[in-house]
Amino acid sequence: MPRRMEDGLDALRERGEAFLVELSREYYEAHAGFKGEAQLQPIFARHARAFDDEALAQVQERFRDAAPGSEAHRSARMLLDWLVESRCGRELAALEEREIAWEASAVIRGNDGAEEPYQRASITIANTRDKKERQALDDARATLVAAELAPLKRERLEREHEVVASLGIADGYVATWEALSGFPIGPLRDACGQFLRDTQAMWDDVLPAFLKRGLKLTASEATRADALALMRAPEFDAAFPAVSMEYEVRWAVSEMGVSPDAHGRVIFDTGDRPGKRARAFCSPVRIPDEVYLVLRPHGGQNDWMTLMHELGHALHFANMERALPFEFRWLGDNSVTEGYAMLFDHRLKDRGWLARHSDLSKSDMPTYLRTAGFEELQFLRRYCAKLIYEVELHSGTTPWHALPDLYVETLTTATGFRYQAADAFLDVDPRFYAARYLRAWQLQALLNESLCERFNEDWWRNPHAGPWIEAELFGHGQRELATEQAARVTGRELSFAPLIRSIEGMLQ
Ligand SMILES: [Zn+2]
């Protein structure tokens, strides 16, 4: 490669990293309550060269010229993927700001005239035990959304398709996404369809009993609002206390031979301050040297699960090989980092781990695990259906006006809960993130099986397992696709088979 091009690549990387470091620090400080609002515009202005037209043209040229399968092609693909995402973000910023403003101020008026802020509606719906009241609130929400928010969301999706097409990378939105992500969506979509068929009998078997026990409902009357209420299941929260959460999680990680704070590179921000988000999150400000794990412990099974999930991300970032170029530390296939996060949070579905670290009693354990298996199957069936629907949405084969009916049919058939047509353009993960989650789910299940073979069922307390995870998984950053990583580490392909095995185990 000529020297001029190499200099160009290093400059692109330097500018990209400097931009992301500043952006991440701003998000961290805003979400952790150190400042009122993230001031993003000045950062975008200061770093405009990192993602301007010239940067995009330069990376697009590299991507075109590099031999498929080469490291140069891999690098260019990740950089281009990121620049396209930035470009869309910039072009759609005004539309997104309108949505955010609407969401912050919208108020739902229920049947009895009571006012409910839009942003609190899903929590209120999940916590409302009366079926009629719950449904009335969700219907009022759907009516308002259909009239005001759904048109904005649809406009943004249409505009995103136009922006992506105008770049001329490949023919259409789906083909462009495939070129930039490095994997085809069709086989995953087909596997989702197969998963739905393979687990249909299991789902038909468990859904009625859970509906009856949890909400005293029959399958024919169940809606998405009921699903929210059913999944809320607070009955085991006392077994996951706030006071011992951080201690238990740190101890668990130490037992596998991993430093819970990566020798100081992960900074646990546990202090209480106004404006700090309630939900735990991870902010990699400098990778691998400065990674924040922000939490405000309030206890309960979801809080423990979120902490484990975010710790999986944090330890991945903090243990990345520092010599890796910018794109292999900051960019790449997020199925990988989500897979590690899920490998950690799925300990909350692991009998041995739960017995050691939670306060679940021996008699509660079978019910807890069955509930966890039921929830896992519900979420997976929902995500499979979402991906099948989102492929239709992004491929342009179904006209826009027909998508809401398709959404309701696809999601309702898969989950057994009736969905609302108003949500067809809201319940869409940005840029096929549903595909990243689905592959992460597959990856964590495969890694768990592989870790059990190498280090026994309780690999999570084997002091040899952690160093292996750091060297073979975390250290590689996000250079590989999830499929490549699975092949290197386990010699196997990603599939839903290990997930089905683990759900069957929980539902026994
Ligand atoms: Zn995550």
Image: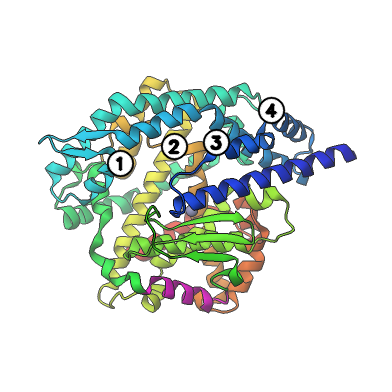
Q: Describe residue 188's horizontal placement relative to residue 427 as left or right.
A: right
Pick the quarter of the image with the C terminus. Answer: bottom left
Q: Do we see residue 508 in this rendering? A: no
Q: Earlier in the sequence, mark 2 or mark 3?
A: 3
What is the secondary structure assignment of the residue under circle 2? helix
Q: CA distance from mark 4 to mark 3?
A: 18 Å
Q: Is residue 351 left or right of residue 141?
A: right
Q: Give residue 388's mark.
A: 2
Question: What is the secondary structure assignment of the residue under circle 3?
Answer: helix
* Residue at 64%, 44% in the rendered image: 19
Pick whichever, 212 or 320, lies toward us: 320
Image disc number at residue 119: 1
Q: Secondary structure at mark 4?
A: helix
How far across and down, in percent of the image, does residue 233 sit?
A: 25, 58
Which residue is painted at 23% across and 41% down in the image?
Answer: 223
- Relative to 308, residue 365 above or below: below
How far is mark 4 from mark 2, CA to CA?
A: 34 Å
Residue at the outermost left position = 112
Q: Which mark is residue 41?
A: 3
Quick check: is 253 in the magenta stretch? Answer: yes
Reply yes or no: does residue 315 show up in magenta. no
Q: Is mark 2 within 8 Å of ligand 1?
A: no
Magenta span covers which residues?
244-258
